[in-house]
Amino acid sequence: RPRVLSGIQPTAGSFHLGNYLGAVRQWVALQETHDAFYMVVDLHAITVPQDPRELRANTRLAAAQLLAAGLDPDRCTLFVQSHVPEHAQLAWIMNCLTGFGEAGRMTQFKDKSAKQGAERASVGLFTYPILQVADILLYQAHEVPVGEDQRQHIELTRDLAERFNGRFGETFTVPEPYILKETAKIFDLQEPSAKMSKSASTPKGLINLLDEPKTTAKKVRGAVTDTDTVVRYDPAAKPGVSNLLTIYSTLTGAGIAELEEKYAGKGYGALKTDLSEVVVDFVTPFRERTQSYLDDPETLDSLLAKGAEKARAVAAETLSRTYERVGFLPAK
Ligand code: TYM
């Protein structure tokens, strides 16, 4: 079976609809066909200041949401990044292989550091993509299921894998991004030119999966569309409507053409009302399932411990081969 690996940050608490449609939904599908490794990336979370208690709670919450979304610990390896020390160890080697200028070209660092003021951003935030490189290479992943905003990090991973292999001999699998065109970028409901994200300009544009379903329904009904009335998929001319159609189509399995036909002559109101129900029907059981996993933290923790053990077996093997290639003296 080909291998996939991906990760999600625990920082924000609730996942949003972009996380789910852009990434987690694919993770669930891929566990059926691939040898799948998925993790909650708590090491990445501390690149910006974190409250320790919140971080711990949000790490469990992220794992609970992944299970609620359909990850099955019997079909995939689900773990917490800091439980596998090899991530930080391989990241160091990758740091030493990356050019300063090369790291400086990562657009996510530019965006994120601009928000905090570049002077105050941590060095960890700067090297964040290099830790991600280590995450992927440790597992010899063939594919990495992510949203469009992670593409540049996968490119860096490919570059560093090839560089290492070229310099020290074949060691790492060079991974491919696994990005589904339709859902690669889910947009903000209020500002359909921007991707849906925690740092949205207004909370009204962001669908948090764990919000009160009533709040969520209201956000969908209040989504920004355009002054036309025709329900048609046309991302360039009609970004708001097209985003709603994408969400509708992926959550229900209905084709875009089918939806265009269904709403022909009906206008945006009907589309938004129906979509608000579709989204509520999705988030309601999702919240309940998440809560049921949280209600039993012992089971959750032991499941994560088992995941870490499986992950570590793979990671340790890659790391020891890497150490040898680099020329570190083996510890006797
Ligand atoms: P993170 O936690 O920001 O996001 C998790 C996943 O959600 C996707 N995503 C979106 N997809 C479509 N539309 C959107 N609006 C949207 N917003 C977020 C992201 O692309 C991502 O796939 N650096 C990563 C975490 C990471 C990782 C890794 C991923 C760490 N190590 C190794 C893959 C492999 C991140 O911050 O994702």
Image (cartoon, rainbow, N blue to C red):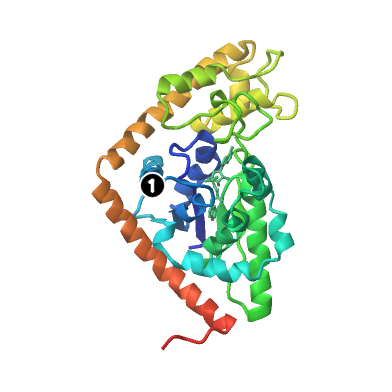
- Image side of residue 248 versus residue 212, left or right: right
- Other-residue count near label 1 (Cα within 10 Å), few / some / many at <14 / 14–19 / ≥20: many
Q: Along the line of sight, which residue is nearer the eye, 197 or 221? A: 197
Q: Amino acid at mark 1?
A: Ala
Quarter of the figure with residue 302: bottom left
* Residue under the image location 35 percent in, 65 percent down: 309
* Residue under the image location 50 percent in, 69 percent down: 89
Q: Along the line of sight, which residue is nearer the eye, 5 or 84? A: 84
Task: Count up the numbered dots.
Answer: 1
* Residue under the image location 69 percent in, 53 percent down: 106
Disc 1: which residue: 63
User: Is residue 148 among the parts visible in the rendering?
Assistant: no
Residue at mark 1: C-beta within 8 A of ligand 1: no
Tell which residue pokes out farthest to the bottom in this image.
332
Q: Along the line of sight, which residue is nearer the eye, 121 or 276? A: 121
Q: Position of residue 167 (x, y in %)?
A: 68, 78
Q: Position of residue 93 (x, y in %)?
A: 58, 71
- Image side of residue 62 versus residue 238, left or right: left
Residue 263 to residue 68: above or below: above
Q: Position of residue 270 (x, y in %)?
A: 55, 13
Q: Quadrant of the C terminus?
A: bottom left
- Image side of residue 179 versus residue 210, left or right: right
User: Is residue 116 among the parts visible in the rendering?
Assistant: yes
User: For the residue labelled by badge 1, is the local secondary structure a helix, a strand or a loop?
Assistant: helix
Q: Position of residue 173 (x, y in %)?
A: 58, 68
